[in-house]
Amino acid sequence: MKANLDKIPKMITAGTGFVGLRMPNNPIALELMRVSGLPIAAPSANKFGHVSPSKAEHVYNDFHKDSEVAILDGGACTFGIESTVLKIEEGEDEKSFTLHILRKGGISEKALYDTVSSPEYKLNEQFNIIIKSKQ
């Protein structure tokens, strides 16, 4: 998502002008966000190049030697694979978007397409959405 650089420091965008957003699927994380009333900025819970953790124990093992670690343990991940990463690009008009899949992960291209096409959400009726997978 294109970052509003008047509100988000350039450091957060790594100089790209974009910001990554995550939506947790964990009731404890969702409640923490709700109660705080604030967005939470956090890096991944693993060191660069290490396998993504699926348990609090994995996070502890990766970090405890280098720094103090406080872990809010919400239990094991429901699936232990990487997140799907999308880049949302606005089209020529305010109702056109392209979803670029930058990294395939837990949410498949088919699941994205099914959600966009779902009669429940009616996104295809409101917006022109194209899904492109990185080759």
Image: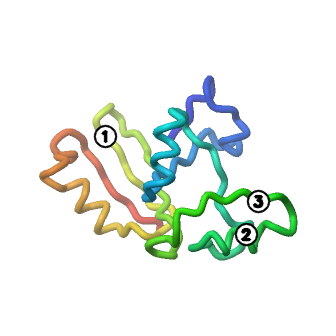
Query: Which residue corresponds to mark 2?
Result: 60
Q: Which mark is residue 133?
A: none
Q: Residue at left 49%, top 54%?
A: 28
The amino acid type, in three-letter code, at marker 2 is Tyr
Quarter-wise, where is residue 100 in the image? bottom left
Count residues near mark 3 (Cα–Cα under 10 Å), then give few for <14, some for 14-19, many for 20+: few
**Please, is residue 86 above or below residue 47 in the view?**
above
Q: Residue at left 24%, top 41%?
A: 127
Q: Secondary structure at mark 1?
A: strand
Query: Which residue corresponds to mark 3?
Result: 69
**Please, is residue 125 above or below residue 52 in the view?**
above
The amino acid type, in three-letter code, at marker 1 is Ser
For the residues labelled 1 and 2, the Cα–Cα distance comes to 43 Å
Quarter-wise, where is residue 125 in the image? top left
Viewer-nearest of discs 1 and 2: 2
The furthest residue to the left:
119
Return the residue nearer the eye: 27 or 116.
Answer: 27
Determine contact: label 2, label 3, CB under 8 Å: yes
The furthest residue to the top:
6
Instruction: Tell me where residue 82 appears, x and y as whole percent.
Output: 53, 70
The amino acid type, in three-letter code, at marker 3 is Val
Count the labels in the image: 3
Query: Which residue corresponds to mark 1?
Result: 96
Return the residue nearer the eye: 54 or 111.
Answer: 54
Return the residue nearer the eye: 96 or 7.
Answer: 7
Q: Residue at left 62%, top 72%?
A: 53
Q: Secondary structure at mark 2?
A: helix
Asked if residue 89 lies left or right of residue 118, the reply is right
Instruction: Tell me where residue 34 appears, x and y as whole percent.
Output: 46, 39
Instruction: Tell me where residue 118 appears, x and y as whole percent.
Output: 17, 55
